[in-house]
Image (cartoon, helix red, strand yellow):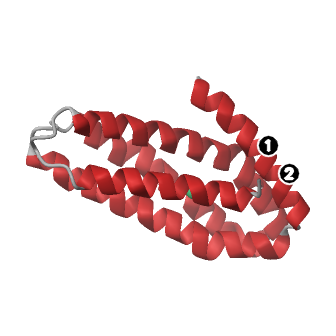
């Protein structure tokens, strides 16, 4: 599978889970943590395959003039993993604070996925061959399988 198709599929899955999460209410005390755990796992695995496999390949192929994209993407991962997700996990699923934090998580992830799809992926298509993208996709798929099972 092409690397970019694989990543886009992940994005769509997380978009769907986030949509479900923000549509819950304070009454969904059980469903909220369930959805959140799913989102966290998907995000962790996705972020890891990007940082281990896709981003370094992108950086290498796309050269210095695209470094900014590479670093910005890393910072956004960090903001989600170190700040927004931990905050949301601490919020009471029966409270309204949870709703606010869930919305911030959704906005941040959607912004990040959109930038990847609209800026990084088109650039990757220019600088990497179809064959390279296929090989990266294979690697990421194997790594993903491993991490999902862990
Ligand atoms: Fe990312
Ligand atoms: Fe991504």
Callout 1: few (<14), some (14-19), or many (20+) C-alpha neighbours within 10 Å? some
Q: Quadrant of residue 36?
A: top left
Residue at left offset 66%, top offset 37%: 144
Residue 100 seen in render: yes
Disc 1 secondary structure class: helix
Task: State the image coordinates of residue 23 (x, y, percent, origin top left).
Answer: 22, 55
Residue at left offset 65%, top offset 62%: 70
Q: Which residue is mark 2?
A: 135
Q: Quadrant of residue 4?
A: bottom right
Contact between marks 2 and 1 (CB within 8 A): the answer is: yes
Residue 75 seen in render: no
Q: What distance separates the C-alpha of mark 2 from that of mark 1? A: 6 Å
Task: State the image coordinates of residue 110 (x, y, percent, origin top left).
Answer: 43, 64
Q: Nearer the viewer, residue 59 or 104?
A: 104
Residue at left offset 71%, top offset 43%: 52
* Vertical position of residue 76 compared to residue 117: above or below: above
Q: Which residue is mark 1?
A: 139
């Amino acid at each position: 599978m092409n690397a970019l198709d694989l990543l886009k599929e992940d994005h769509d899955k997380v978009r769907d889970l986030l949509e479900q999460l923000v549509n819950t209410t304070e009454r969904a005390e059980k469903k909220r943590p369930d959805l959140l755990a799913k989102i966290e796992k998907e995000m962790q695995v996705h972020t890891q395959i990007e940082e281990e496999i896709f981003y370094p390949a992108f950086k290498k192929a796309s050269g210095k003039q695209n470094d900014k994209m590479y670093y910005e993407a890393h910072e956004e991962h960090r903001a989600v993993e170190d700040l927004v997700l931990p905050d949301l996990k601490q919020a009471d699923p029966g409270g309204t604070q949870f709703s606010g934090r869930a919305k911030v998580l959704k906005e941040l992830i959607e912004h990040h996925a959109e930038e990847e799809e609209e800026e990084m992926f088109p650039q990757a298509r220019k600088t990497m061959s179809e064959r390279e993208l296929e090989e990266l996709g294979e690697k990421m798929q194997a790594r993903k399988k491993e991490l999902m099972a862990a």
